[in-house]
Amino acid sequence: MYLVYGVCEELSKKSTMNEYLKNLNRIEFVVTLACTGRCKHCQNGDPVHTTEHIDADAAVRAIQSICKHYKIETLMTFGGEPLLFPDVVFAIHKAGTDMGIPRRQVITNGYISKQHERIEAVVQRLAACGVNDLLLSVDAFHQETIPLEPVLDFAECALRSRIPIELSPAWLVSREDQNPYNIRTREVIEAFTPLHIPVGQGNVIFPSGNALKYLKEYFDENTTASSPYEEDPRDIRSLSFSANGDVLDSNVYQTDILDIIRTYKITE
């Protein structure tokens, strides 16, 4: 049993450090913008060839500090492909487990290697550090450039390691639309049927990044869309760290996260 387990769960009162973050209950880390895929729908744009990633020690310190003042319900790592830097992901989720954050999620495309031994080793460490919610991105877009076999192997390893896993496809226009991409996505999902992995809601592609570049004919030019992931600056519930340490118009490498929270204000 971890010595500080349950710190976040034991907080019953909302923090008053900053009125704009009184309902904060989620922490997210964009581990890296580097990726093993080259997806047409990626909101980050074309893949970034970089070794930049969030610093593990800085991330761990931030998690520990935040959890002393807020009841955090969810911790998520994603990218890019976060498992290009697995040790960073392990450290982040180990800290989340130690601090008693109930839901510890990783979004991954599952393509980290073609070697079974490597895939199994990474998945076993994900289980050991406390990941309890794997969202596996599989669909027409990912499988245009990512081979399916190693992703199936990744999913099988997750099942053997008893990590809860669900498929998280990206849908174009809507989940019900019968465009060629959605038809192909359903075929990809079908390949996972023998594994009996549940299929989650996934997400409907938002017109930004590569989606505007490669899929613009599927979007209504006369409709002004707002990002479904955009936070209300007056009621921030999810604290998102970029791969370079940016958070809340500041940077966690330069300023302590609690000072960033305390001094955050809306600029009109």
Image: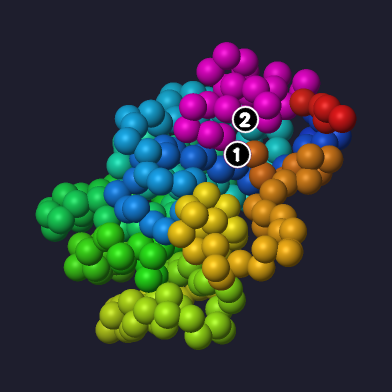
Q: Residue at x 82, y 36 (%)?
A: 20
The quarter of the picture where residue 99 lies is top right
| Secondary structure found at label 2 | strand
- The residue segment tinted magenta is 240-263
Q: Position of residue 24 (x, y in %)?
A: 72, 42
Q: Which residue is mark 1?
A: 240
Q: Are the residues at dot 1 and dot 2 in contact (C-beta closer than 8 Å)?
A: yes
Q: Which color scheme does this rendered protein use?
A: rainbow
| Vertical side of 99 occupied by 59: above or below | above
Query: Is residue 202 something that shows in the picture?
Result: no
The quadrant of the image that shows the N terminus is top left
- What is the count of numbered marks? 2
Amino acid residing under circle 1:
Ser
Q: Secondary structure at mark 1?
A: strand
Residue occupying the point 75% across, 42% down: 236
Query: Does 181 sit above or below residue 154?
Result: below
Residue 43, label in figure:
none
According to the picture, the residue beneath numbered tag 2 turns out to be 247
Q: Quadrant of the C terminus?
A: top right
Viewer-side residue, 264 vs 187? 187
Q: Residues within 10 Å of mark 1 (few under 14, many from 20)?
A: some
Please tell me which residue lies in front, 250 or 268.
268
Image coordinates of residue 33 in percent, x first then y, are 42, 39
Q: Earlier in the sequence, mark 1 or mark 2?
A: 1
